[in-house]
Amino acid sequence: MTGSLWIYTDDTPASMKKVGELIDLKLKIDGQDIDTSNVDDAGWGSSITGARSWELTISNNLIMTDAAYALISAALIAGSSLYAYILQSGTATSSPKGWKGPCGVQSGAITLAGTNTQQKADWTFKGRGALTAIP
């Protein structure tokens, strides 16, 4: 698996922090349906895509000293925005391929103890603006 997530507070490569030990990284992009059905549709419904939104869910091994973890948890508590580099391949500074965009941390669930699991963190990020492709 080659995907990675980089978190930053401003759009400069020096401030980007890689989220360590990812277990799972999922990007969901949705478009809101706007009904345009009319009498000329011959009985068929029709629609156009309205506002789009995106959401990112991740799981990673819990590393309290991870610099990205500190940015994520601080943004969750403060309600502040972050920026995400969601990469299919490459790194933030070397041949990145994927997407980037502003987001907020919607929720976090931290597993501190369990008989069948390691310590881990699950995070949900909601887009706060356009998601753009990194070619």
Image (cartoon, rainbow, N blue to C red):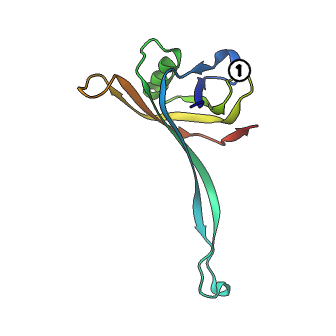
Query: Quadrant where the N terminus lies?
Result: top right
Kindly identify which residue carries mark 1. Answer: 12
Q: Is residue 112 left or right of residue 87?
A: left
- Which image quarter: residue 62? top left
* SS at circle 1: loop
- Name the residue rendered at 59%, 19% in the picture: 17
Residue 16 % position (x, y): 63, 20
Residue 103 % position (x, y): 57, 35
Q: Nearer the viewer, residue 52 or 27?
A: 27
Q: Nearer the viewer, residue 115 or 55?
A: 115
Residue 134 % position (x, y): 73, 36
Q: Find the residue positioned furthest to the left.
A: 115
Q: Find the residue positioned furthest to the top.
A: 65
Query: Amino acid under label 1?
Result: Thr
- Name the residue rendered at 58%, 28% in the picture: 5
Q: How many marks?
A: 1
Q: Nearer the viewer, residue 78 or 24?
A: 24
Q: Is residue 109 left or right of residue 128?
A: left
